[in-house]
């Protein structure tokens, strides 16, 4: 690969009019890159997750291959494959379709090269755009279709191999459940480029990896995508290592402690232990321990709205000075809960030292 500043020139010379789409002014593929290779921004640790809606500037961001230079490009989105009317839509076309908003927890599954390491890259934001069902009903789905494959225009080297696009898939049933968006905005503002702007997929209830950024195509298919990000990466066996690998789609139950932080807890003073809990399905109970897991106590949990994370609270008045291990554990209606073993949704804990009041 050439230097970043010469990249655009070289590409312009070597492939002046290459476009994957019909029509004028579509994004040249491959587009130049603003950044190359894997990147990550992650500043918001659980103790700072104090607001229901995470400000966009605080939300983590991940890219595997690079960040494409899309700021001045005119965009097209194609909808094709097993459809009766293939579509090629401009951004204006997308913006003039009925718009909707959904607030949803946004959680990264962590590195596909180290999938059991909890990263706690998570936030809760309001996405705006067109329902995927809207686009699919305009295109008309053919009989036998089972998946929707999405691609992003980013390209580059990940894990030692070159990938000419980022490609994901999701079951047609999920694509049609009404929650999935082709999004133009986050928290009411146009998507910043790093966030996937101008257009991205948002799959509420699924790990962030499925929400393809820089979205340029949707393909209805009777089979899964054969791409690396759906076959080699983000395919996992169950915790016991037995059985067939399955895609990293639905969010496993997870929760994190926001407060209290170390230094804020005093003997005989009431304090609120609180945090956020989420899963693909609603969380129905959260338990809190103040003794490192010997005893678990039911916390109060707010009911879920849309795909938001849910707040839990537990009042605590420590009676003695010393170190206490606090932790929380979320469970869903179907009984799925969080493990204590090294998994991406391992129980979150925090040690606090309880001192005498000043
Ligand atoms: N095109 C494209 N989409 C992508 C990715 C990517 O590398 N390229 N990364 C995925 C992963 S792993 C996550 S966690 C989310 C991150 O979205 P964010 O940067 O808006 O937080 O985007 C997903 N969509
Ligand atoms: Mo991710």
Image: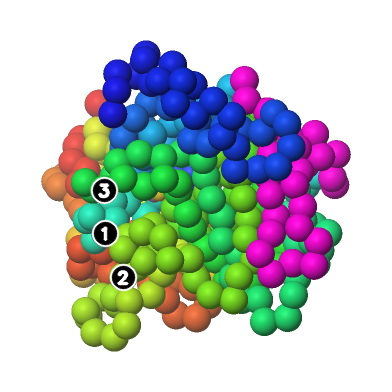
From where the camera sits, is residue 169 visible? Answer: yes
SS for callout 2:
strand
Cα separation between marks 1 and 2: 8 Å
Give the residue furthest to the left: 322
At which x and y percent is residue 13? Answer: 46, 20
Nearer to us: label 1 or label 3: 3
The residue indicated by pointer 2 is 236
In this view, the residue in front, 217 or 336, is: 217
Q: For the point 23% across and 55% down, which residue is it? A: 113
In this view, the residue in front, 254 or 317, is: 254
**In the rendered structure, are the residues bearing label 1 and label 2 in contact, judged by CB atoms less than 8 Å apart?**
yes
- Residue 34 vs 254, above or below: the answer is above
Tell me, for residue 115, which label it has, or none: 1
**Mark 1, other Cα within 10 Å: few <14 / some 14–19 / many ≥20:** some
- Residue 66 vs 240, above or below: the answer is above
Pick whichever of labels 1 and 2 is earlier in the sequence. 1
Q: Which residues are magenta?
A: 72-98
Nearer to us: label 3 or label 2: 3
At which x and y percent is residue 269? Answer: 34, 41
């Amino acid at each position: 690969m050439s230097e970043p500043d010469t990249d655009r020139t070289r590409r312009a010379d070597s492939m002046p009019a290459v476009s994957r789409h019909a029509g004028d002014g579509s994004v040249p593929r491959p587009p130049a890159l603003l950044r190359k290779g894997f990147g990550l921004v992650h500043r918001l640790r659980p103790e700072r997750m104090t607001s229901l809606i995470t400000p966009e500037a605080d939300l983590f961001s991940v890219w595997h291959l690079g960040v494409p230079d899309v700021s001045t490009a005119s965009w097209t989105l194609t909808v094709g494959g097993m459809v009766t009317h293939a579509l090629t839509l401009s951004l204006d076309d997308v913006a003039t379709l009925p718009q909707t908003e959904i607030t949803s927890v946004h959680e990264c599954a962590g590195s596909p090269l180290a999938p059991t390491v909890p990263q706690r890259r998570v936030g809760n934001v309001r996405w705006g755009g067109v329902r995927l069902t809207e686009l699919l009903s305009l295109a008309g789905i053919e009989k036998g279709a089972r998946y929707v494959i999405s691609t992003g225009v980013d390209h580059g080297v990940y894990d030692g191999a070159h990938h000419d696009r980022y490609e994901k898939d999701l079951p047609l049933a999920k694509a049609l459940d009404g929650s999935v968006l082709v999004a133009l905005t986050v928290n009411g503002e146009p998507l910043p480029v790093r966030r996937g702007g101008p257009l991205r997929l948002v799959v509420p209830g699924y790990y962030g990896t499925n929400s393809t950024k820089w979205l340029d195509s949707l393909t209805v298919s009777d089979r899964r995508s054969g791409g690396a990000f759906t076959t080699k990466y983000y395919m996992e066996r169950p915790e016991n290592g037995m059985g067939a690998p399955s895609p990293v789609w639905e969010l496993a139950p997870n929760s994190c402690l926001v407060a209290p932080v170390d230094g804020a807890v005093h003997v005989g003073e009431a304090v609120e232990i609180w945090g956020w809990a989420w899963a693909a399905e609603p969380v129905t109970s959260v338990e809190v321990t103040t003794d490192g897991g010997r005893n678990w106590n039911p916390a109060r949990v707010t009911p879920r709205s849309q795909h938001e994370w849910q707040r839990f609270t537990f009042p605590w008045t420590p009676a003695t000075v010393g170190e206490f291990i606090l932790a929380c554990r979320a469970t869903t209606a179907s009984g799925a809960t969080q493990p204590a073993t090294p998994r991406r949704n391992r129980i979150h804990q925090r040690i606090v030292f309880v001192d005498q009041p000043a």
